[in-house]
Image (cartoon, grey):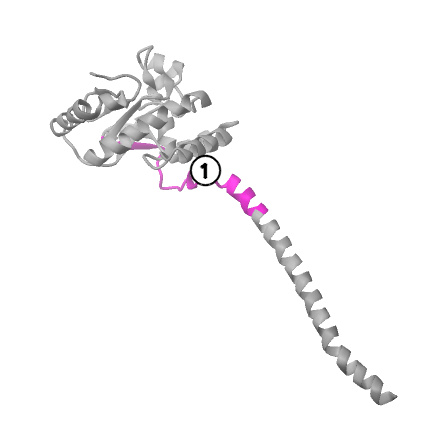
Amino acid sequence: MDTQDNRECELESPQTQRRRLLLFGAILLIAILVILLFTSEKTRELGERLISPIDLLPLPEIPDVYDIQGYPAASERVFSRFLKQKGNHALYSKLKDFLRINRVDQVVPPFELLRQGSDWQDLEEPPFAIPPVENWGAMVYTLRAVQREIVPIIGPVTVVSGWRTTSYNSKAGGSRGSKHLHFCGLDIVPQKKFSREQLVPVLKNIHKHNGRQWNMGLGIYKGIRFHVDTCGYRRW
């Protein structure tokens, strides 16, 4: 009788072991799933807080004002302070997502689009401002024109004036119909070294051959600063 019982135990033992292994595997799988869910949630929360390096405290070596080919431009350090003001961080994050979805977020750093101008200090106006959501679509087409027509010819560019508030535009002596007020116009400067004599003919040629298809406005200012928009075919 004892021998038969021992044999039954020996026969049951592998089944019991398999059950235990299956139970252990199930518990382990559940634990892994819980950890993954917790980790993904924390990663998402961290991603919302750390949108880009600009959102972090600026490095000590970054100045408040850049000299962009002779034009003053507020830096990332100043922009990081601007983001801390009520509502700016969340709205800027939405703007970046909008530009990314429309595949124009890499044409220029998005924060440059919010520079009001290069004379904010003299005008005692904020260096940055964020346009209303309903104006964002106009900038997509302008950025595409810059990306496809201008950058391939003269190289990368820096924006020294993008969106402007009515207050800034008025103090700066801008036109009441300025395309900056509609988030359609950009004042930009080439990053490569150009003389005015070299740059102006190139820009005029771009506008002559491709400007109409983009409904492009081109304005050439003193020095090597120029204006581009896609809200009316014209040149000055």
Tell me which segment is drawn in magenta.
41-69
User: Is 84 placed above or below 17 here?
Assistant: above
Badge 1 is on which residue? 55
Where is residue 202 drawn, in percent x and y? 15, 28
Residue drawn at the location 40% of the way across and 42% of the way down: 59
User: Is 223 placed above or below 50 here?
Assistant: above
Where is residue 219 drawn, in percent x and y? 22, 19
> Left or right of 110: which side holds 16?
right
- Quadrant of res 130: top left
- Quadrant of res 171: top left
Where is residue 43 drawn, in percent x and y? 54, 47
Q: Is residue 13 magenta?
A: no
The total of numbered circles placed on residues is 1
Residue drawn at the location 52% of the way across and 27% of the way down: 87
Image quadrant for the C terminus? top left
User: Is 198 placed above or below 10 here?
Assistant: above
* Near-viewer residue (123 or 182): 182
Q: Say what amino acid the circle numbered 1 marks.
A: Asp
Q: Pointer 1: residues within 10 angstroms few (<14), some, or many (20+)?
A: some
Q: Is residue 52 magenta?
A: yes
Image quadrant for the N terminus? bottom right
